[in-house]
Image (cartoon, rainbow, N blue to C red):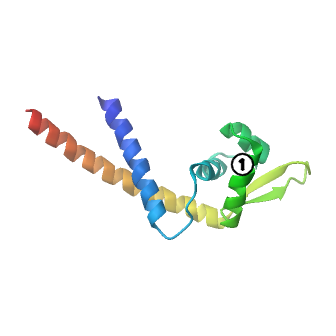
Amino acid sequence: MAQASTTDHLVTTLRDTIVSMVRRDGPDLSARQLGVFLTCYLQEGAHTVRGLAADLNVSKPAITRALDRLGELDLARRKVDPMDRRSILVQRTLKGAAYLRELRSIMSEASTVSRKSGHVEERTSRRAAG
């Protein structure tokens, strides 16, 4: 029962976060673009198109399309690897770091609201059952 409650909380937090991101005035990323963005910003180390494709188990052209969009929004940029000119490095940007801070803030707020409403629903259902 507790696991279902935790899962419901996570799904509700995800839903509320996505709705908030869509409603605000700012970039609206697809799930793939968000996955690429979060991988670049949350996993340490250098990221390449090839490495991201392997990490996310998607094709290199799919990563390239996601990076095209992230580049348009200045959330990430590509640069030729000076050590291996055949390889493309993905770099973080200041605007991307700000976007991640905003995303964290929205998720935190959505999680708090979800927890509070979950406790209210839990108590209400206990009263009704008791």
Residue at 72% of width from left, 54% of height from top?
A: 65
Is the residue 49 above or below the residue 72 in the image?
Answer: above
Residue 107 located left or right of residue 27? left
Residue in view at x 35 percent, y 39 percent: 8
> Residue furthest toward the top?
1
Q: Quadrant of the C terminus?
A: top left
Q: In the displayed structure, would residue 129 be above or below residue 11?
A: above
Which residue is rendered at x = 43% and y = 58% of the image?
A: 19
**Residue 47 screen position, x and y as percent:** 74, 48
Residue 128 picture location, percent across and down: 10, 37
From the viewer's perspective, tell me whether residue 64 is left or right of residue 120. Answer: right
* SS under mark 1: helix
- 89 lies left or right of 21: right
Res 73 → quadrant? bottom right
Q: What is the crowding at mark 1: few (fewer than 14 residues within 10 Å), some, or many (at least 20)?
A: many
Three-letter amino acid code at the position of disc 1: Ile
Q: Hey, which quadrant is residue 123 in on the image?
A: top left
Q: Is residue 129 above or below residue 74?
A: above
Q: Nearer the viewer, residue 45 or 111?
A: 111
Residue 57's image quarter? top right
**Foreground residue, 12 or 113?**
12
Q: Position of residue 99 (x, y in %)?
A: 56, 62
Q: Residue furthest bottom?
A: 25
Q: Is residue 76 visible?
A: no
Pick the quarter of the image with the N terminus.
top left
Residue at 44% over, 55% down: 17
Q: Nearer the viewer, residue 122 or 19?
A: 19
Tell me where residue 18 appears, x and y as whole percent: 46, 55
Q: Which residue is mark 1?
A: 63
